[in-house]
């Protein structure tokens, strides 16, 4: 299930877009915080964000979690939701109160797909549930981006335009081709990138020890921009087929991976001509907010060189992490096989 979040400070037009999406037949979730405010205002001593923000955020997290779990029963292909569990962190930090200890864990389990961050509208109106003045609304707006960014989400900024244009913008950004490898590589020393990475919520996902062999016939596949590869990774044998890339500055190509028995791997190695082989040690990390994204610290012994690779479901997320980790000056277009081949040719002269 794809879960799309619409967020932004008070008065950015989230609710209006959610209503429009619902009219078009999309499955949507309304803002939990607003619902709770309406309910608590009916009580003599209700729990409200302007009287007890910490307790109020606990109520929001509890109901948001139950609501997102309940929707799974219906197994929709995708949902659009007005805010998420993440928003509570921004509100708590702005109000200088503690948020629930297990909130990061719940966010990691939620499996959000993408965040639509709405730019502020040129006007602002308060109401019975929206008590924040314009100055506080702006601070919350900025804090929301900082929190989603810190947790490593795939954030798409939605510009100020008509409601119809905003809805069309959101729907277009949900369209993506399946089975695509989207990645970019950087020649950079690991220590300087890891120092920056500490500012973000990421989780170590293991270390791979790979032996890679590419097969080709008189460079036919290479000239077509295609790849036929067998990778032995921690004793698992994987056959990979890749098509030509769609982007000259970034790898964006169709990719299929098949786990195969070792005997088939060895048979292919005997029958097909190899074009290049190389080893790689890869240390992997996943952002808390996007389990489909992998930040890898690679070392290739044949080159005695360190690299970083960012792989994600969208080009937008790759570029976001490139900016976050200050990697732009270190981007390279060559693939690892091309670099190894170039090194072999240079050494053979």
Image: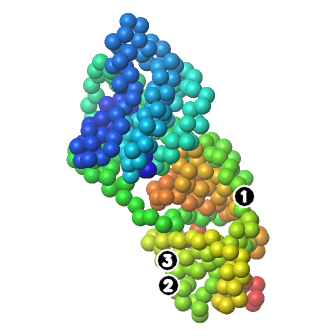
Question: In the image, what residue occupies the spot 76% across and 74% down?
Answer: 302
* Residue 276 versus residue 245 in the image, above or below: below
- Which label's residue is closer to the chain start, 1 or 3? 1
Locate the C terminus by quadrant: bottom right
Is label 3 in a helix, a strand or a loop?
A: loop
Tag nearer the camera, 3 or 2: 3
Between 164 and 143, the one lying in front of the other is 164
Q: Which residue is mark 1?
A: 207
Q: Which residue is mark 3?
A: 243
Question: In the image, what residue occupies the spot 27% across and 25% down?
Answer: 125
- Mark 2: few, some, or many residues within 10 Å (few <14, many ≥20)? few
Q: Is residue 342 visible to us here?
A: no
- Mark 1: few, some, or many residues within 10 Å (few <14, many ≥20)? some
Q: Is residue 197 left or right of residue 137?
A: right
Check the image and name the residue furthest to the front: 73
Q: Which residue is mark 2?
A: 224
Pinpoint residue 2: horizontal percent, then vertical percent: 43, 50
Give the CA distance from mark 1 to mark 3. Answer: 27 Å
Question: In the image, what residue occupies the spot 69% across and 47% down?
Answer: 195
Give the CA distance from mark 3 to mark 2. Answer: 8 Å
Between 264 and 58, the one lying in front of the other is 264
Check the image and name the residue furthest to the bottom: 218
């Amino acid at each position: 299930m794809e879960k799309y979040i619409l967020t932004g400070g008070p008065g950015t037009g989230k609710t209006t877009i959610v209503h429009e999406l619902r009219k078009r037949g999309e499955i949507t979730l309304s803002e939990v915080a607003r619902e709770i405010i309406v309910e608590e205002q009916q009580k003599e001593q209700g729990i409200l964000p302007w009287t007890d923000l910490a307790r109020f955020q606990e109520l929001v997290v509890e109901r948001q979690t139950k609501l997102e779990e309940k929707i799974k029963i219906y197994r929709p292909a995708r949902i659009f939701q007005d805010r998420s569990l993440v928003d509570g962190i921004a509100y708590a930090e702005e109000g200088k109160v503690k948020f629930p200890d297990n909130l990061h864990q719940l966010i990691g389990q939620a499996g959000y797909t993408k965040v639509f961050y709405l730019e502020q509208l040129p006007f602002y109106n308060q109401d019975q549930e929206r008590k924040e003045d314009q100055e506080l609304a702006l601070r919350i707006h900025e804090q929301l981006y900082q929190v989603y960014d810190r947790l490593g989400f795939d954030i798409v900024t939605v510009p100020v335009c008509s409601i119809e244009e905003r809805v069309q913008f959101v729907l277009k950004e949900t369209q993506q081709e399946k089975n695509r490898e989207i990645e970019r590589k950087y020649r950079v020393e690991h220590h300087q990138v890891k120092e920056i990475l500490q500012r973000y919520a990421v989780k170590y996902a293991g270390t791979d020890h790979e032996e890679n062999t590419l097969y080709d016939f008189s460079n036919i596949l290479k000239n077509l921009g295609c790849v036929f590869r067998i990778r032995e990774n921690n004793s698992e044998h994987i056959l990979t087929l890749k098509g030509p890339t769609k982007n000259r500055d970034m790898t964006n190509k169709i990719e299929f991976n098949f786990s195969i028995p070792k005997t088939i791997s060895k048979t292919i190695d005997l029958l097909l001509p190899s074009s290049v082989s190389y080893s790689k040690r890869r240390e992997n990390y996943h952002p808390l907010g996007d389990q489909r994204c992998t930040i890898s610290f690679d070392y290739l012994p044949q080159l005695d060189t360190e690299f970083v690779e960012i792989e994600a479901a969208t080009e937008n997320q790759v570029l976001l992490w490139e900016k976050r980790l200050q990697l732009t000056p270190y981007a390279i277009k060559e693939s690892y096989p091309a670099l190894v081949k170039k090194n072999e040719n240079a050494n053979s002269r």
